[in-house]
Image: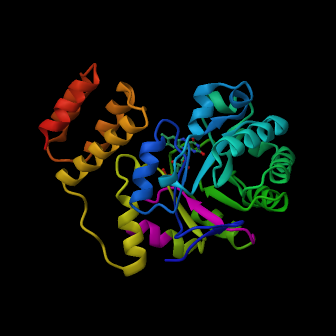
Amino acid sequence: MSSLTIGKLKLDGNLVLAPMSGVTNLPSRLLCRKYGASLVYSEMTSSEAVVRQSLKSIERGFTCKDERPMGIQLMGSVPENLAESAIFLQEKFRPELIDINFGCPAQGVIKNGCGSELLKKPGLIGEIIRMLSDSLDIPLTAKIRISDNFDETLKIAEIIEKSGADAITIHGRTQKQGYSGKSDLDFIKGIKSKLTIPVIANGDIFDEKTSQNVLEYTRCDGLMIGRAAIGNPFIFKKISYFLKTGEILPSRNTEERLGDFFDYVKLCRNYDMLTFNDLKRNAQWFTKGMENVKQVRMKINKTHDIDSIMAIMNGLV
Ligand SMILES: Cc1cc2nc3c(=O)[nH]c(=O)nc-3n(C[C@H](O)[C@H](O)[C@H](O)COP(=O)(O)O)c2cc1C
């Protein structure tokens, strides 16, 4: 397995945890790092909210020694505010890098001209990347979606490279697609062949086989994994083991998956991040695919407090 170098940051592999709003909090990132993610990203944080000193947004950048290297992802469209918030977070949490979100298709984000809406303004993307790369001491990455047109997408990637980004992640879907259809590997492969900065492929990497296919087909420098890691941090161990040895590790059995869930709870308690809503979502995610899971999930659905969820999960052991 090759290792990925982003600016001055040398990683110990090339598997990256995707930034996922409502998912990649510190405890879940720590579990993914434990199982071999080489780099993890925070949930996206609004630069406007950071500039307003919103504590909830600032705290998304909270990190600890065990999780490094980590990147904080920022979302916004005003270059000066993105730069101000990036400098603030760089000083406060000392992340290994900052990422800018040019890919989010959510209505609430694009109506403010942020996320994937910025793909319609390549000039502004260039201005944002230039201002941030000039302002930061740490590497800068950008995460994009593709547009319908290859040349247009390539132009955006080239602007990002020329303006000073140290790496780019490409999710091979358009804004309009959301999560439907397939991630377009031809776009990713074509862009990779034209850039000199590292390119990280993203979209539909779910297991050993898809990882190998995407790496071999696109010749990208790294892989970013999102949905497959939700409630399943062990995916990083499975994939990295396969890429190193060509062998497939057995999937986690129920006991092991519950062990991961209880570790998640412990980490949430350690960092004072345990909330009912988050625990309920994670209980559903960590039990996905288990035997007789339908009834368990129905029971979890009906809970109203943390103790009830823990009683159900303890009952599965
Ligand atoms: C629940 C959820 C939240 C997401 N939040 C973010 C986010 O905050 N920032 C971002 O750049 N992408 C976000 N994404 C997109 C993922 O980072 C990734 O690009 C996408 O899921 C495709 O990768 P996958 O097929 O491995 O899941 C999110 C995706 C999901 C499913």
Determine the residue located farthest toward the bottom in the rendered image: 245
Q: Residue at x 75, y 69 (%)?
A: 195
Determine the residue located farthest toward the top in the rendered image: 304
Question: Is residue 37 or residue 120 the one in the foreground?
Answer: 37
Residue 144 seen: no
Rendered location of residue 269, percent (x, y): 36, 35
- Whether residue 211 appears in magenta in the rendering, the answer is yes
Q: Quadrant of the C terminus?
A: top left
Q: Residue at x 81, y 53 (%)?
A: 133
- Whether residue 198 appears in magenta in the rendering, the answer is yes
Rendered location of residue 101, percent (x, y): 67, 45
Q: Which residues are magenta?
A: 195-213
Tell me how many marks there are.
Answer: 0
Question: Is residue 95 or residue 171 the one in the foreground?
Answer: 95
Rendered location of residue 239, percent (x, y): 40, 67
The quarter of the displayed image where residue 249 is located = bottom left
